[in-house]
Amino acid sequence: MTTSPQEQAPAPPRPEAPGGHPQRWLILGVLCLAVLTVVLDNTVLNVAIPSLTRELGAATSDIQWMINAYSLVQSGLLLTAGSAADRYGRKKMLAVGLALFGVGSLVAGLADSTGQLIAARAGMGVGGALLMTTVLAVAIQIFTPEEQPKAIGIWAAVNSLGFAAGPLLGGFMLNHFWWGAIFLINIPVAVLALVAVVALVPESKNPQGDRPDLLGAVLSTIGMAALVYAIISGPEHGWTSGRVLLTAAVAVVVLAAFAYWESRIPYPMIDMHFFRNRRFMGAVSGGVLITFGMGGSLFLLTQHMQFVLGYEPLEAGLRTAPLALMIVALNFTGLAAKWAARLGTPLAIGLGMAVMAAGLASIATMASGGYAGTLLGLVLIGAGAAVASPAMSHAIMSAIPPEKAGVGGGINGTVAEFGTGLGVAVLGALLNSRFAALISVAATSLPAALSLADGEAEKGRILDAFSSGLETSLLVGALAVLLGGLVAGALLRRAERGDSA
């Protein structure tokens, strides 16, 4: 691999004072406000699924693409956005991202067809990519090395809070307004954050940084989109159908081309040598699987609460709130940080993800018996995420050179977005496959199957089939999270031993 002159030159000095930027905690609050809006949109759409199914005639595959269009575009562009922020200015890219996100939210809120909403969500993903990379990069620049773990912990807590609070906010909005309001509410928040960014956030950039890798961005976006499309299409068209096999082959070829391209060019979005770093690989593998299980499970759980248990959107949101409350309680009181410091990063990540897996298993095995099993599961998931997520983010950023803070933020965001999108696709596909195998009517979604059911007895069997599919999917999610904790903990432990030696 060749080395560019830019890579050989030393990184420029950071703009902050030796004690950090004097307004760094206020700036962190502004950054968290911006990222909260972006993360909320990963899950806020979940509780609107019945409304979209009813008002836009959306099928299950349409719903999955409404969710995945946002996360896939975002994950495909995160690395390029991070590289551009390092080179052209993190404040500038943050402001552009807020503007694009606000405009995309306006278009999504006024959409009157599934196609328009999917396109608007993809546009929001572009703005979200710029936001997710620059927020973490700016935080790294304005805090001292000693304060960075605490700052990243707060940032990660806000990420987890937004991820879990999306159903609650969506339920509240749908209880008082039509479904488009869940997007329009983003606009005043984006405007407020944009004004605060312009007034408070200092500009920082690395003029000697790498130039954006546009071909790499195209390849990664196409490859991941093809992969998820194959997974979504499998239950409907058959896993051995020509369409699914062709799409899967395209995904493999394009992602292989992406890896080859990144290993050959002097300005890659991601240096392939990072994958030889055990700390980096441990954090990345754990991050993908933690968001895989959590994102896919919340997607399924909100449907179960509304379709099977009969809760209204706001009621469903309130009943998922214990997850968010646990994350807030443990992170903002500092308990999660104290536990993580006492346990060490490898054990904190492994133990946190094991607790999350137990929570998912609790929901899978006890959800049909009422809310008690679900409540226990949500509390366990929240406790595990509060400990594991900040430790995971700090492990990723600590494996990236400081002058590559934007790219580091892009990698961290890519892990989260790709894991979430893949979790929704895989666990959703498992649920659909199991559900279709158990019901006796031809339908692509639970509402459609219920409308075709002949009598209450048939409806009961259809709901039981959906619950069975949910249990299978959640158990797969629990296994993925547990496996991620074991792999991440083992790799990070080996990295620490190597550093000590």
Image (cartoon, grey):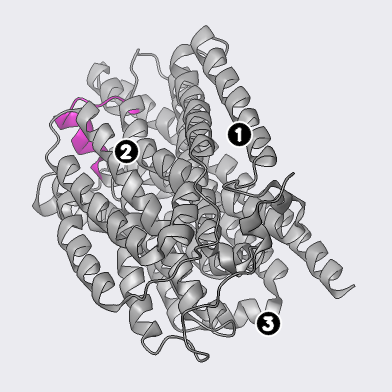
Residues at circles 3 and 1 in contact by the CB criterion of under 8 Å? no
Label 3: element kind: helix
x and y, in percent, of residue 335 in the image: 53, 82
Which residue is located at x 85 percent, y 67 percent?
A: 498
Which residue is located at x 33 percent, y 17 percent?
A: 443
Q: Tell me, yes or no, whether the highlighted magenta stretch contains residue 252.
A: no
User: In this view, which residue lies farthest toward the top?
Assistant: 242
The answer to which of 260 and 118 lies nearer the viewer is 260
Q: Identify the residue under disc 1.
A: 258
Vertical position of residue 122 compared to residue 454: above or below: below
- Residue type at mark 3 is Arg
What is the distance, in whole Å, between disc 3 and disc 1 at their CAs? 40 Å
Q: Identify the residue under disc 3.
A: 342
Q: Identify the residue under disc 2.
A: 122
Vertical position of residue 89 compared to residue 118: above or below: below
Q: Which contiguous range is marked in magenta?
A: 48-60
Q: Residues within 10 Å of mark 3 (few under 14, many from 20)?
A: few
What is the distance, in whole Å, between disc 3 and disc 2 at their CAs? 42 Å
The quadrant of the image that shows the N terminus is top right
How many marks the image carries: the answer is 3
Vertical position of residue 156 compared to residue 55: above or below: below
- Residue type at mark 1 is Phe
User: In this view, which residue lies farthest toward the left?
Assistant: 177
Toward which corner of the image does residue 6 lie, by quadrant? bottom right
The answer to which of 177 and 18 lies nearer the viewer is 18
